Image (cartoon, rainbow, N blue to C red):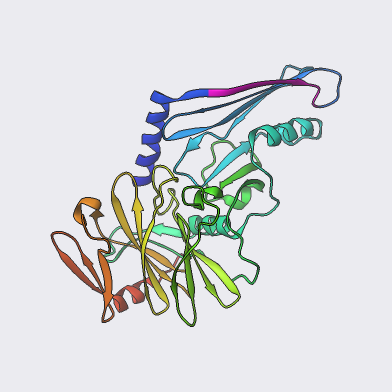
Amino acid sequence: MKNNIVILFCLLSFSLLGQRRGLQHIVEDLNQDNFKDTVTTYYEGGSGFGGKFIEIVNGKTQGKFELNTDGCFCEFYRFVDIPDILLETQNEYFLKAIQKHLLPKKREAIDPSLYWLMENYKNSFSLKDNIYFTLQSNPKINWSSKLFEFPSTYFTIVEKKDFDHINFEEKTKKAFLVYYGHNHKSNFTKDSTTLIFKNKTYQIYTTAHGVFVKKGKQYKWLFISDVNVTGAPEKLRWASIETIKHWKHYIFIDQTLAPSGEHQIIFINIKTGNLAILNLDIHDKDIEGKKDYFHISKNKLIISTNETQKTIAIKKLKKELNQINLN
């Protein structure tokens, strides 16, 4: 519900403040049938929503293809339905034109960070009556021995049958999956990974919105803010990863959701990847002036706000987290 409110707010902002710019018209014979086809592109957006739009008109038949990447700036990824007719052989040149003028660079397979996001989406569930957690997930991510790859922005074509947990707008066979991986960078700097913890076993790094861990020559993602699952800032240019605390094979992440001022503590098992959001209600006003509002002492998580202090035995959190059952 919370995530739906964020996206609804973005939609209202877009409807009130949306502006169109970058209008381009291209006239050429795309499919080499001796008829001039027309490609029209433009960007339209507001303070919280936006995307690129494209219209292609078949010069011979006057048939139209219209697609867009419109969405909330809070989203790391976006599915764009591909009309089945575009996948037919006679329309392959129109499909190529759409990829060229609408989308970022193409990639054949998704990178590990987007794979984590897809697995987390598929393997998460909300909790209503749990005293410790409001959400649990087991993304089922294995250690990778490949060279670490910082996320980038790209698209790939996916079979929608492989994403039956997604509510697609149209009943088509395929979709463009667009990933805005550049948002992992802090203020668009070149290197946006920060080493925040190191011991004999683990090296834990953060990006603006993610956490990954290295163990020897292996690594894997542990967390990425996702408005569809864990919540995220209304604009991804606002970093969401704050303090991180380490306890044995577990970490606690302070995730902040600007501009609401809401904070969430994410509890993660480094070995299994299981994660959960603690059942707390914390806002900026509750921890004003406190740089680290939670810490670990004698196997206990101690959360201090301006009004109260709460202590939770970490072993109880550990036991609850490791009982994750998605069946």
- Residue 279 in the magenta stretch? The answer is no
Decide if residue 49 is in sight here.
Answer: yes
For image coordinates 49% across by 81% down, the residue present is 201
Q: Which residues are magenta?
A: 21-30
Magenta segment, principal secondary structure?
Answer: strand
Q: Is residue 48 above or below residue 28?
A: below
Front one among 35 and 167: 35
Front-most of residues 1 and 185: 185
Seen in the picture, residue 116 relative to 231 is either above or below; the reply is below
How far across and down, in percent of the image, does residue 296 sit?
A: 28, 74
Q: Is residue 218 above or below residue 57?
A: below
Q: Nearer the viewer, residue 112 or 208?
A: 208
**Left or right of residue 235: residue 31:** right
Give the image location of residue 137, x and y in percent. Answer: 44, 63
- Specify whether 133 is left or right of 175: left
Q: Residue at x 59, y 44 (%)?
A: 178
Residue 216 position (above or below residue 25): below
Q: Is residue 26 magenta?
A: yes
**Which residue reaches farthest front?**
190
Residue 134 is situated, as x and y percent measured from the top left of the image, at 32, 59
Q: In what quadrant of the picture does the N terminus appear?
A: top left
Which residue is most to the left?
307
Q: Which residue does the image show at 61% across and 75% down from the upper left? A: 217
Residue 309 placement (x, y as % from top left):
17, 66
Quarter of the image where one finds residue 171? top right
How many badges with numbers are in the image? 0
Residue 142 seen from this side? no
